[in-house]
């Protein structure tokens, strides 16, 4: 099987690229020249800008593919470019959407692929929804062979997933220094963390899978945790009990609308994903990395090199400010 990954070196996609190579998929990667440790020969790295159709055509030359996966399409213009480029070049086009596209606020915490798509809070999610609609229209009218994949909160060794502190070392630094760590809401809403190596098993399993054409599917872990449990696991991996402070998502949004959009448009609600569909499409699929183990790997990766242990000073100060205002307004 010959596959093209557009991007292919990010937090989620790097694990999929590695697994594809392990399974002897003939993998090509198109990007603008990002460094990677993937064991590919020079001919399989295609240097071009997918945002520039002519640049991408020059990079692709006469190549065609059994499957194309676009990891970096975020609005309708992006998928229009892909439709034009790959209409005659691929037997399957996989669009990486987002589970944040599902209805917010949800009518029910249990989410299937038939849950409506609607998100009034987050432009990122609305753009993904618009992309899905355009691609599905092209599938219905012209047979464009699309498969939509919706990841949820997926992390790997280079990420420590934390809503307000970002995905770097900052939250671990706060925990180890005994500083308070913000948890949105009351910390009891339910959430799903998926290790990128588990996501990769589902994604690679649908490549070249004719039963996935015209379908939408999410790929997540079956492990369900509260946010308090998630932060407790981060603290255990960091070697210190976190001092948690629960702050309303609306207050966080007032200080940081970018983070707030991802809260109010996604993580502020209980979301538990029914993975029956991916298990039908990929028999034997199972997420096997519990969050406690995955986050230990992540913290160990940061601890292995002092240069990785960078504190985002802007986020750190912002969290201090949010906590200060909250404690003044609600003392004790």
Image (spheres, helix red, strand yellow):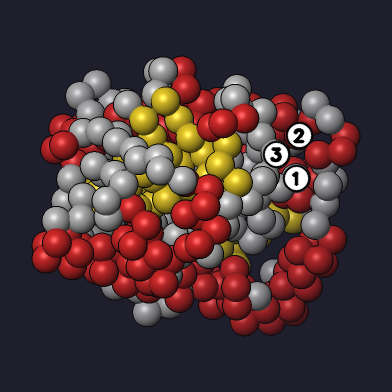
* In this rendering, the label closer to the viewer, 3 or 2: 3
Q: Nearer the viewer, residue 23 or 320?
A: 23
Label 3 neighbourhood size at 10 Å, few (<14), some (14-19), many (20+)?
A: few
> Tag 3, which secondary structure?
loop
Q: Closer to the N terminus: mark 2 or mark 1? A: 1
Which residue bears the numbered disc 1? 169
Label 2 neighbourhood size at 10 Å, few (<14), some (14-19), many (20+)?
A: many
Q: Closer to the N terminus: mark 1 or mark 3? A: 3
Q: Nearer the viewer, residue 85 or 20?
A: 85
Q: Position of residue 276 (x, y in %)?
A: 19, 37
Marks 2,1: beta carbons within 8 A: yes
Which residue bears the numbered disc 3? 35
Q: Nearer the viewer, residue 161 or 136?
A: 136
Which residue bears the numbered disc 2? 302
Q: CA distance from mark 2 to mark 1?
A: 7 Å
Q: Which mark is residue 67?
A: none
| Residue 136 shown left or right of residue 44 in the figure | left
Q: Nearer the viewer, residue 266 or 278?
A: 278
Label 1 neighbourhood size at 10 Å, few (<14), some (14-19), many (20+)?
A: many
> Tag 1, which secondary structure?
loop
Q: Residue at x 40, y 18 (%)?
A: 23
């Amino acid at each position: 099987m010959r596959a093209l990954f557009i991007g292919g070196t990010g937090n989620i996609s790097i694990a999929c690229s590695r697994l594809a190579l392990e399974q002897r998929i003939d993998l090509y990667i198109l990007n603008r020249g990002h460094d990677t440790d993937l064991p590919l020969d020079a001919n399989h790295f295609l240097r071009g800008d997918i945002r520039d159709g002519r640049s991408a055509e020059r990079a692709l030359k006469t190549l065609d593919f059994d499957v194309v996966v676009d990891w970096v399409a975020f609005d309708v213009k992006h998928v229009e470019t892909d439709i034009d480029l790959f209409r005659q070049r691929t037997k399957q086009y996989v669009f990486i959407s987002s589970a944040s596209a599902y209805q917010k606020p949800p009518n029910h915490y249990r989410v299937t692929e038939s849950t409506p798509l609607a998100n009034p809070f987050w432009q990122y999610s609305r753009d993904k929804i618009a992309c899905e609609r355009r691609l599905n229209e092209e599938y219905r009218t012209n047979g464009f062979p699309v498969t939509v994949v919706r990841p949820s909160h997926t992390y790997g060794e280079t990420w420590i997933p934390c809503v307000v502190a970002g995905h770097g070392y900052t939250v671990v630094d706060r925990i180890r220094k005994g500083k308070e760590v913000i948890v949105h809401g009351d910390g009891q809403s339910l959430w799903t963390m998926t290790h990128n190596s588990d996501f990769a098993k589902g994604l690679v399993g649908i490549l070249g899978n004719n039963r996935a054409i015209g379908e939408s599917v999410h790929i997540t872990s079956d492990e369900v945790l509260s946010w308090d449990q998630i932060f407790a696991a981060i603290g255990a991996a960091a070697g210190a009990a976190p001092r948690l402070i629960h702050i309303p998502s609306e207050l966080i949004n007032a200080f940081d609308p970018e983070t707030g959009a991802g809260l109010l448009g996604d993580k502020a609600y209980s979301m538990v994903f029914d993975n029956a569909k991916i298990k039908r499409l990929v028999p034997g699929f199972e997420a096997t990395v519990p969050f406690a183990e995955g986050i230990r790997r992540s913290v160990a990766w940061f601890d292995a090199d002092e240069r990785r242990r960078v504190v985002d000073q802007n986020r750190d100060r912002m969290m201090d400010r949010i906590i200060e205002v909250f404690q003044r307004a609600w003392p004790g």
